[in-house]
Structures are given as C-alpha cells and as structure tokens.
Amino acid sequence: MDRLVIAGGRRLEGEVAVSGAKNAALPILCAALLTREPLILSNVPRLNDICTMLRLLEQMGVKSERDGHRVSLDASDLNNPVAPYELVKTMRASVLVLGPLVARHGEAQVSLPGGCAIGARPVDQHIKGLQSMGAEVGVDHGYVNARAGRLRGARIFTDMVTVTGTENLMMAACLADGETVIENAAREPEVVDLAQCLVSMGAQISGAGTDLIRIRGVERLHGAEHRVMPDRIETGTFLCAAAVTGGDVRLTGTSTGYLDAVVDKLMDAGCDIVGEKTPSFEAIRIRAPHRLQAVSIRTAPYPAFPTDMQAQFMAINTVAEGTAIIRETIFENRFMHAVELQRLGADIRIDGNTAVVKGVDRLQGATVMATDLRASASLVIAGLVADGETTVDRIYHLDRGYERIEEKMNALGARIRREKA
C-alpha cells in the first residue's frame, strides 16, 4: 500500500492541466450499455475507479480499448448483466449499470455498492424510480435484482436529491416507451454532461441542469463520440492548495463556471481568481495572499457549496486568520478528516454536523491516515503548509479520484514523494 510524504513550506506557482471528471466519466461509461454501436470517449481520467468500471463492463461482455485518455467501448455482445460484489464493493458508482442494463437487456443483478465510508447513500430512489417505470425490483442476499420487458415512461419524484439516482433513471428512460419526467432531479454539471452524451447518441432529453428533466424514450440509441468535462473537484482542490500556500497558479482545461460557490468563498478568503476563455481554451488563474481569511461554509446540493469540497476548505481554514463554521448537510459521517487534521495541530471542535475551526499560526508535520477520497485531499493540502514532513497513509482513496496528484503538485513546486508503506 502506498503513502505520500510531503515536505511542507513550499509556495505553489506555475501551470498545470486539470483532468477529466471522474464523476462524469463513470456514468458516461455506463451509457455504453444502452447501444450496440461503439461509444468513443476522450478526456477520460486515468484513475483506479475508471479501471474498476472498465473491468466491470468487460465482465458483462463489453469490449473496451484504451489509449491514454481515450476509451472506446463496444457493448454489442452484452451477455452477462451481473455486477458482482468483488468489483462493486470499492466503488459506489457501480450501481449506475442498473438502469442501462434493465432498459436494454431486460434484467440486471447488481450488488449493493460500497465506496467511501462517509455515511449512508441508499439506492432506494433508484429502485423506486425503476418500479415506477414498470420494472420488478427486489433486494436479495445483498443484490438488487431487476427485470422488465420494455420500460414505460413515468413521472418520478425523488424524495431526496440524488446524483446517481438521477443519472440511473435518466439512462433507463432513454429506451422506455413514452415520456419520463424526473422531478427533484440533481442539477450537477456531471448530470448535464451525461445528458449531452446521451443526446449525441440519439436520446431526447430536455431540462438537464434543472430540477425537472424530461426524457422521451426512443427505440434505440446509436454510437457517438463525446469529450468528458473537466473535473471541478480536482479544480477546486488545486485552487485550495494554491490558496493555502500563498501561491500563484494557472489551471488549464477547466472553468470557473462549474465552481461558482467555491470561487466565491476563495475570493472571500482573500484570493484573486480570474477565468480565461476562448472558443477553444479555458483556464483559471489564482493569486493568493500570504495568509487567508477564515470562511464559513454550508454544504448543499448543486449549485450550492459542494460536499466534495468541504474537507479541502476545512484544511485551509486550519491556518486562516479567524474562526470558520463548517456545516455538513449531505453526509452524516464526513468529518473523519478532522481528527487527522488535529494530529497536525489544527484547532477543530466537532458538534454533530457542525465543525468550528479556529485558525492557528502553524501546523506541525505528522503521520496521518486517509479515511475517504476527499479527506485524503485535505490532508495533502494541510501537509503543504505544515512544518517538517507529513506522511499520508492509505492513499488508495486518493488514487480513486485524483490523477497523478503528486506529480501535478510537484510541477507547481511542491515536494511530495510516493513510497511503499
């Protein structure tokens, strides 16, 4: 198992490219199940979760070829609509094969998902939506078993905003008979990116990016080519790393348009952030002060402040001027990184879903343990400004969501090395 060793005290400066979005690429990979024709994707990040999803699709009979950040998928010989526990246990996004399999193959057997230990993320909304569309769905021995003839359009109201639920039902509805309306739909940019890919495959979708999405089912979808959107959470993470080190960094291949809430908070902290855009190119430049001002945040579904950036902002607040209040409203177990930040000398008090972070002058390097994907990123950010060396153990979480993070950080002037634990 690998670990990262970080020598603190280096200001980040320079330019680095942002990878494609993991949370957009995963459902788009699953969209290949909806057609017998090839789906060709570009800007696909090279991550452990992507490799796991490709293995999952391949064991279902999907042929895949990968060349750098380009992936070609051919599901013409789909023959095994099963997502086994061995592949699903490390990645919750595996549940995204459920809707496409039922829609095209007429059946699916999908293990209940795993992933990060950040609280309950039930699939009941996925099941409820598929049942509304005429599928017979049950849970038996840890597997969701679904069967249907052709799905039929339905009006679906999700009891909670769910990104993967919206994506699963939207994909299933593409091949249903009639119109499906998803109310209280997730509005995330990744949902929009999936919709754009599906439309390029022949789907009829309107309203993606709003809380009401309409899908008129078609008889079949065809092949297509699609470029995955940039990773807004990687973008935000690198913005926080630059901010906490008083850096001057330019991120290419990404946009401030995906990150309004995060950019606003960083500007409140004292950073100067400028977006650059031409017809063929986008970038963000951040210039940070010597010391940030503390900023309070409250997570909520998009377009509000993203839960996937909460840990990174807790890290920058540990050394900011003043006191910040952080309220987590999405997941009930997403403050596990606070204990590890305390090992570095952070002044953090937890009360339920609220953290009070009082900035200190300096953090001290220590050995810490990553507990989930975004917690890993927060510990790297803290290590960048801690005195001495910080060792982050169990970074397999980090490799699930960040492509070559230590190489990219080092290109900006950080001193991070990967070791075998």
Image: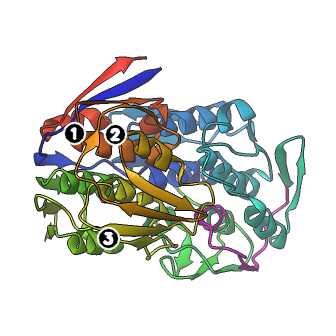
Q: Earlier in the sequence, mark 2 or mark 1?
A: 2
Which of 309 and 152 lies nearest the eye of the viewer? 309
- Residue 371 colored in magenta in the image: no
The residue tagged 1 is 409
Q: Nearer the viewer, mark 2 or mark 1?
A: 1
Which of 390 and 376 lies nearest the eye of the viewer? 390
Amino acid identity at mark 3: Val
Q: Give the Cα separation between the discs numbered 2 and 1.
A: 20 Å
CB under 8 Å between discs 1 and 3: no
Q: Earlier in the sequence, mark 3 or mark 2?
A: 2
Q: Is residue 178 toward the left or the right of residue 174 in the image?
A: right
Disc ID at residue 69? 2
The residue tagged 3 is 295
Q: How is the image coloured?
A: rainbow
- Residue 56 % position (x, y): 62, 35
- Residue 411 % position (x, y): 14, 37
Which of 219 and 282 lies nearest the eye of the viewer? 282
**Residue farthest toward the top in the current orientation of the protein:** 420
Looking at the image, can residue 401 be seen?
no
Instruction: Tell me the element at label 2.
Output: loop
Neighbour tally class for label 1: few under 14, some 14-19, many 20 plus, Cα within 10 Å: many
Q: Nearer the viewer, mark 1 or mark 3?
A: 3
Which residue range is magenta in the image?
A: 147-168
Q: Give the Cα separation between the discs numbered 1 and 3.
A: 24 Å
Instruction: Tell me the element at label 1.
Output: helix
CB under 8 Å between discs 3 and 2: no
Amino acid identity at mark 2: His
Amino acid identity at mark 1: Met
- Residue 340 % position (x, y): 45, 41
- Residue 149 colored in magenta in the image: yes
Q: Is residue 242 toward the left or the right of residue 61 in the image?
A: left
